[in-house]
Image (cartoon, helix red, strand yellow):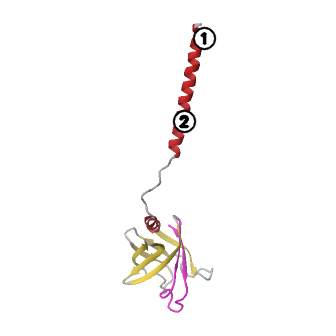
Amino acid sequence: MKRKKTQNQISIYMKTYFKLFSLLVFVLVLVSGCKKDDDPGETEAERQQRLVSKTWATGSVSYTEESTPLAGFDDFSITFNSTGTFSTSGGQAGVSYLPSSGSWSIDSNDLTALTLTDNGNTVEVDIVTLSETAFVFNVAGPGVKATDPDRTVRYDLVSQ
C-alpha cells in the first residue's frame, strides 16, 4: 500500500511540475514576443530628419520627363549633417541644380518639403522617396538650369 501512495505522489508531483513548466514556457514566449519600438518617442519629422542625415551618392540624375540620366553626375554626392548643414561634391561642371553647401530643413507640416538655403538663396526640394537606403527627390523651377528653367530634375540617390 505504501508503494501505491508513493506512485500517486510521484504522479501528482509530475503533473504539477509539468503545469508549472508549461506556464513558465508560455510566459517566456509571451515576454520575448513583446518587442519595444526602436524609439517610441520619435516623431515622424524627427524620423525624416534622421533618415536624411547622412551622405547620399548618385544612383541617377535625370529630367523627370526623361528616363535617360544626365551626363556628369556619376560622382555626385550630397551630405546632410544632423546639425542642419549640407554640402555637395562632384556633379556636372557649370550647371547648378543645387547649392554647393548651406543649411537644410524639413517642413514639420509637410514632410515631403525639404528646403536648401545658401547665402539667402532658397531651393525647394520635393521628397519622393526616403528610406534607410534610398532618397529620391525633385528640384523644379528657376535655378535648375538657366536655359531651361521649367524642367524638373529628379535625383535618385543611394545611401553611402
- Local crowd size for mark 1, using a 10 Å CA cut-off: few (<14), some (14–19), many (≥20): few
Q: Is residue 41 magenta?
A: no
Q: Single out the mark in the foreground, 2 or 1.
A: 1
Residue at (53, 42) in percent of width and height? 30
Task: Give whichever of 44, 100 is nearer the camera.
Answer: 44
Percent from the top left, x then y, of residue 107?
Answer: 43, 74
SS of the residue under disc 1: helix
Q: How many marks?
A: 2
- The image shows residue 124, relative to residue 53, as above or below, that is below
- Bounds of the magenta segment: 133-160
Marker disc for residue 25: 2
Whether pointer 2 and pointer 1 mark residues with C-beta atoms closer than 8 Å, the reply is no
Residue at (48, 78) in percent of width and height? 125
Percent from the top left, x then y, of residue 60?
Answer: 57, 76
Q: CA distance from mark 2 to mark 1?
A: 31 Å
Residue at (62, 80) in percent of width and height? 68
Question: Farthest right residue?
Answer: 67
Marker disc for residue 4: 1
Q: Is residue 32 left or right of residue 4?
A: left
Occupied quadrant, residue 22: top right
Q: Looking at the figure, which quarter contains the N terminus?
A: top right
SS of the residue under disc 2: helix
- The image shows residue 119, relative to residue 84, as above or below, that is below
Percent from the top left, x then y, of residue 84?
Answer: 38, 71
Q: Is residue 77 left or right of residue 83?
A: right
Q: Amino acid at mark 2?
A: Val
- Local crowd size for mark 2, using a 10 Å CA cut-off: few (<14), some (14–19), many (≥20): few
- The image shows residue 103, relative to residue 142, as above or below, that is above
Q: Amino acid at mark 1?
A: Lys
Task: Give whichever of 113, 2 is nearer the camera.
Answer: 2
Q: Earlier in the sequence, mark 2 or mark 1?
A: 1
Percent from the top left, x then y, of residue 67?
Answer: 63, 79
